[in-house]
């Protein structure tokens, strides 16, 4: 007997619909799965067999052949366990699956309990786009799935409950979708002593979504300034929040499987990060740090200490807003539009630009240190900020500096104006402008053109640097 059910899997961060076809024949008992299953899907045979028996049902003593369609799509992860079990039970006439607009997903434990899976938001969105109306899944994933509108969420705790729902029983009440709790910023700009120029640069960067490179001696406050940046960034819009949550769901980073991320991500990386961890990929394709920073901030402290191949890999996402990862059996494209904030010392000892201390580095050491950063990478920064060592008077000053909440008001006002400017475009702020938008929105008068001509010739600027100067000026 042949049975068909609809399951889901995740490819990169996108959900993909999978047709699960189960055929029983009167031959020696066996259980075969075809259609490019990975190890986790092949191992589902044992989980499904044990879960069916431990749920008080009969596992058919026949030859079972399961085809996962489309056959050219690699199926990864345990998301298909529940669909496989329902297909086997339907083919053996133990379960009647009458609804065609139903997607089934979830991992099975050996005792028949349902376990949550990653990527639920992506899979439910794919099911809705495919015209399906209902989805049957583990209770722990129901809150996340409820973020998708126009879908009926059927939540179950076990295989037994799932079968009851298919027979018309009552589904478990899913928890309502919850927002990620807002974490108070660890550092407020009011706590930063001095550094008025650097604060102003970060405010401009936050308003326009520009990349910043801070240079200064150790202890000047570069890391502290970067940690303050999230406190002045506006909250994610509805579409941005859903997109960011989708990425974190596919990566398995959602807390309790029921949160909507509303605060912009801030990712601080250690200099030992590998290219694969930064860009994504691996044996089971997962989003990397550049994608986890999407719609937020990626902070690289002590930039020259990072591996050169990792830094050079940033060039594509900084330019295109996405990263393409090619692996043996597939190519994945992840969104990666983020603000890059980086810091470095002027030399290995850090004292080259310090007027109060003597640098002990040789000219060769300084040159070798700076050569770790390529010209094309530096060309992708919009703002270069000097962060000098604080004077004693600045360190001991007791007057309160401007708090982050006041700076944030100006940033939000600037973002509103930019959204109005780009209301007919797919971009939302100045840092995302392409050549056409720069030409339309950043027109120079005669005096400005003369100034840029002298700067272009004297500073030997590239065309990319010229465009980035205009974007910052527009902000």
Image: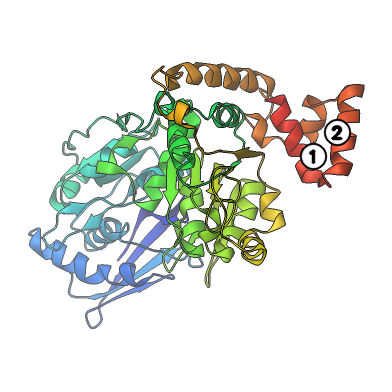
Secondary structure of residue under mark 2: helix
Residue 197 appears at what percent x and percent y?
Answer: 59, 29
**Left or right position of 115 against 287:** left
**Quarter-wise, where is residue 10 in the image?**
bottom left
For the C terminus, the quadrant is top right
**Residue shown at 59%/49% (left/top)?**
322
Task: First in sequence, mark 1 or 2: give its number.
Answer: 2
**Left or right position of 87 against 318:** left
Residue holding disc 2: 452
Mark 1 → mark 2, Cα distance in angstroms: 8 Å
Residue 83 appears at what percent x and percent y?
Answer: 29, 56
- Circle 1 crowding by C-alpha within 10 Å: few under 14, some 14–19, many from 20: some
Residue in front for this viewpoint, 204 or 49: 204
473 lies above or below 353: above
219 lies above or below 429: below
Residue holding disc 1: 466
Q: Are marks 1 and 2 in contact (CB under 8 Å)?
A: yes
238 lies above or below 353: above
**Residue shown at 25%/81% (left/top)?**
27
Secondary structure of residue under mark 1: helix
**Residue shown at 53%/20% (left/top)?**
412
Evaluate whether residue 377 shows in this view: yes
Residue 191 appears at what percent x and percent y?
Answer: 39, 27
């Amino acid at each position: 007997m042949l049975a068909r059910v609809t399951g889901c899997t995740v490819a990169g961060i996108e959900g993909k619909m999978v047709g699960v076809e189960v055929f029983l024949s009167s031959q020696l008992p066996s259980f075969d799965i075809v259609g490019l299953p990975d190890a986790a899907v092949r191992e589902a045979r044992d989980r499904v067999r044990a879960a069916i028996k431990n749920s008080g049902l009969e596992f058919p003593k026949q030859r079972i052949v399961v085809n996962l369609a489309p056959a050219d799509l690699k199926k990864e992860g345990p998301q298909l366990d529940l669909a496989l079990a329902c297909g086997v039970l339907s083919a053996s006439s133990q379960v009647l699956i009458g609804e065609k607009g139903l997607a089934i997903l979830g991992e099975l434990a050996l005792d028949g309990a349902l376990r949550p899976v990653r990527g639920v938001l992506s899979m439910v969105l794919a099911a809705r786009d495919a015209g399906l109306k209902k989805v049957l899944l583990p209770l722990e994933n129901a809150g996340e799935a409820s973020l998708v509108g126009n879908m009926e969420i059927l939540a179950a705790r076990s295989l037994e409950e799932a079968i009851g729902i298919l027979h018309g029983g009552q589904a478990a009440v899913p928890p309502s979708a919850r927002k990620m709790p807002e974490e108070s910023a660890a550092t407020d700009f009011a706590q930063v002593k001095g550094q008025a120029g650097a604060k102003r640069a970060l405010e401009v960067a936050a308003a326009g979504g520009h990349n910043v490179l801070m240079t200064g001696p150790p202890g000047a406050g570069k890391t502290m300034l970067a940690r303050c940046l999230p406190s002045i960034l506006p909250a994610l819009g509805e579409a941005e929040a859903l997109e960011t949550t989708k990425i974190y769901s596919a990566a398995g980073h959602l807390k309790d499987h029921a949160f909507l991320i509303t605060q912009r991500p801030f990712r601080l990386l250690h200099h030992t990060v590998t290219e694969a961890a930064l860009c994504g990929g691996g044996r089971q394709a997962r989003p990397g740090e550049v994608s986890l920073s999407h719609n937020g901030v990626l902070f690289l402290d002590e930039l020259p200490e990072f591996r050169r191949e990792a830094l050079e890999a940033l060039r594509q996402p900084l330019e295109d807003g996405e990263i393409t990862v090619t692996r043996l059996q597939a190519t994945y494209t992840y969104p990666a539009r983020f603000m890059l904030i980086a810091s470095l010392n002027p030399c290995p000892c850090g004292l080259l630009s310090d007027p109060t201390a003597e640098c002990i580095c040789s000219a060769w050491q300084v040159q070798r240190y700076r050569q770790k950063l390529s010209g094309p990478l530096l060309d992708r920064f919009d703002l270069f900020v000097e962060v000098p060592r604080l004077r004693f008077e600045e360190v001991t000053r007791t007057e309160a500096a401007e708090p982050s909440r006041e700076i944030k008001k100006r940033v939000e006002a600037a973002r509103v104006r930019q959204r109005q400017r780009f209301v007919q475009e797919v971009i939302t702020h100045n840092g995302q402008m392409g050549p056409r938008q720069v030409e339309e929105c950043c027109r120079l008068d005669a005096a400005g053109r003369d100034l840029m001509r002298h700067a272009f010739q004297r500073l030997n600027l590239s065309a990319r640097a010229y465009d980035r100067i205009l974007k910052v000026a527009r902000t």
